Image (cartoon, helix red, strand yellow):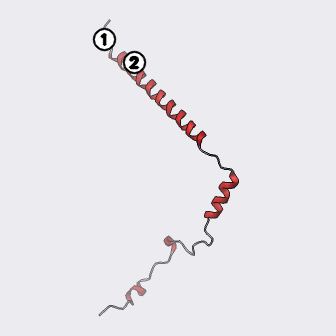
Amino acid sequence: MPFDPLTFWLQGSMVWASVFRQQQQAYMRMLCNMANAVPHETAADVAAEAESMRRSKPKTQPLHRRPRATKAALKTKPVPA
């Protein structure tokens, strides 16, 4: 039987595709097992924690919206002697 590079390449690709699929399935099983082991919180607990982390008073104005200094104000600065 003569050597067929296309068939050889396709068979090799299928081997690596199956290896990749098996690794992906094992990884997904591991993630599912880890997710099942994590203790589940109730929605009320999560909401209470979020409310406790909320700021009591919002900022007055964000930094990116503060007015810039005018050129006149920059010129009137005293120069140290």
Disc 1 marks a residue whose amino acid type is: Phe
Residue depicted at x 59% and y 44%: 38
Image location (x, y in percent) of residue 36: 60, 39
Q: CA distance from mark 1 to mark 2?
A: 13 Å
Q: Is residue 46 above or below residue 36?
A: below
Q: Residue furthest left?
A: 81
Q: Residue furthest bottom?
A: 81
Q: Quadrant of the C terminus?
A: bottom left
Report the number of numbered marks. 2
Answer left or right for 27 relative to 58.
Answer: left
Image location (x, y in percent) of residue 64: 49, 70
Q: Is residue 58 above or below residue 6?
A: below
Q: Is residue 52 above or below residue 12?
A: below
- The secondary element bearing badge 2 is classed as helix
Image location (x, y in percent) of residue 49: 64, 59
Closer to the camera, 5 or 70?
5
Between disc 1 and disc 2, whose residue precedes?
A: 1
- The secondary element bearing badge 1 is classed as loop
Task: Tell me which corner region of the image, top left, top right, bottom left or bottom right, holds residue 31.
Answer: top right
Image location (x, y in percent) of residue 60: 57, 75
Q: Tell me if mark 2 has few (under 14), some (14-19) or many (20+) residues whose alpha carbon lies within 10 angstroms of its own.
A: few
Q: Which residue is mark 1?
A: 3
Disc 2 marks a residue whose amino acid type is: Gln
Closer to the camera, 30 or 22?
30
Closer to the camera, 38 or 57?
38
State the mark number for residue 11. 2
User: Disc 1 vs disc 2: Cβ atoms closer than 8 Å?
Assistant: no
Residue depicted at x 41% and y 21%: 15
Q: Is residue 13 above or below residue 1?
A: below
Residue depicted at x 30% and y 8%: 2
Task: Tell me which corner region of the image, top left, top right, bottom left or bottom right, holds residue 16.
Answer: top left
